[in-house]
Amino acid sequence: MFDFLSDYDVLGAFWTTVQLTLLSAIGSLIWGTALAAMRVGPVPLMRGFGTAYVNIVRNIPLTVIILFSSLGLYQTLGIDLGADRTESINFRLAVLGLVIYTSAFVCEALRSGINTVPVGQAEAARAIGLSFSQVLWLVVLPQAFRSVVGPLANVLIALTKNTTVAAAIGVAEAALLMKEMIENEAQLLLISAIFAFGFVCLTLPTGLILGWVGKKVAVKR
């Protein structure tokens, strides 16, 4: 029943999915944190940029962003992100598209965590002479991150599933291989079950582990 699997690199495809997820998660956490800092900052221009970015990007389908990364940045403007092979270029463009999209959700999750930090703590920090950036990075954000481990876990799980959109620009991840296998083999239900099980193996432990971490580091109020 499973003999046909030897003709396909299923583990390699899922490894590409894992790489997409990890690199995109790191980039999204960095850019999403910067956006959250902008949204709660004292500079109106930065607040406006952060608000506009989040509201616009969250309402654009991920497929459009991924396709724009390939058709717009690479094929039209010639931006290859330092790669010299088509496979590497598409992979990096997919990561960029996922970061652009996911960071908006990371920002909102963090902003909700920032809102849980008592205002008095920030006022006390300012009273002893700390600047806004020092208050944010030393007092507010550490508590905000501890408050939103659960929501960030949900964003990470959604990101893992969203990596399937990278197949639209030819990234050799799980969804692209699944499409190829369905086209070549008369095993629709079996192939679908195999890939569904693979994604469950990726997302379920992530949710359980981060859920446990969230309970351990939660701020006691």
Image (cartoon, rainbow, N blue to C red):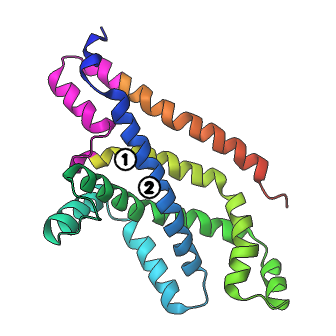
SS class of the residue under badge 1?
helix
Q: 28 left or right of 40?
A: left
For the residue carrying disc 1, how many other residues have a C-alpha within 10 Å: few (<14), some (14-19), or many (20+)? many
Contact flag, marks 2 and 1 (Cβ < 8 Å):
yes
> How many circles with numbers are drawn on the protein?
2
Residue 190, percent from left and from top: 31, 18
Front residue (pair 196, 82): 82
Examine the rendered structure and indicate whether residue 185 appears above or below residue 117.
above
Q: Is residue 76 above or below residue 133?
A: above
| Residue 62 position within the rendered picture, expressed as x and y whole percent measured from the top left | 33, 57
Which quarter of the picture shows residue 147? bottom right
Residue 68, placed above or below residue 202: below
Q: In the rendered view of the protein, which quadrant contains the N terminus?
A: top left
Asked if the stretch drawn in magenta spans residue 191, the answer is yes
Please name the amino acid that badge 2 sits on.
Answer: Ser
Report the amino acid beneath label 1.
Thr
Q: CA distance from mark 2 to mark 1?
A: 9 Å
Q: Residues within 10 Å of mark 2 (few under 14, many from 20)?
A: many
- Reading the image, the residue beneath label 1 is 163
Quarter of the figure that contains the C terminus: bottom right
Earlier-in-chain disc, 2 versus 1: 2
- The answer to whether residue 136 is above or below residue 165 is below
Residue at which label 2 appears: 24
For the residue labelled by badge 2, is the local secondary structure a helix, a strand or a loop? helix
Residue drawn where x is 84% and y is 57% of the image: 220
In the picture, measured across the screen, residue 1 lies left or right of residue 146, that is: left
Residue 112 figure quarter? bottom right
Residue visible at 69% across and 75% down in the picture: 137
**Is 151 included in the stretch rendered in magenta?**
no
Magenta segment boundaries in residue numbering: 167-193
Q: Is residue 4 left or right of residue 214?
A: left
Q: Residue 58: x, y in percent?
A: 40, 65
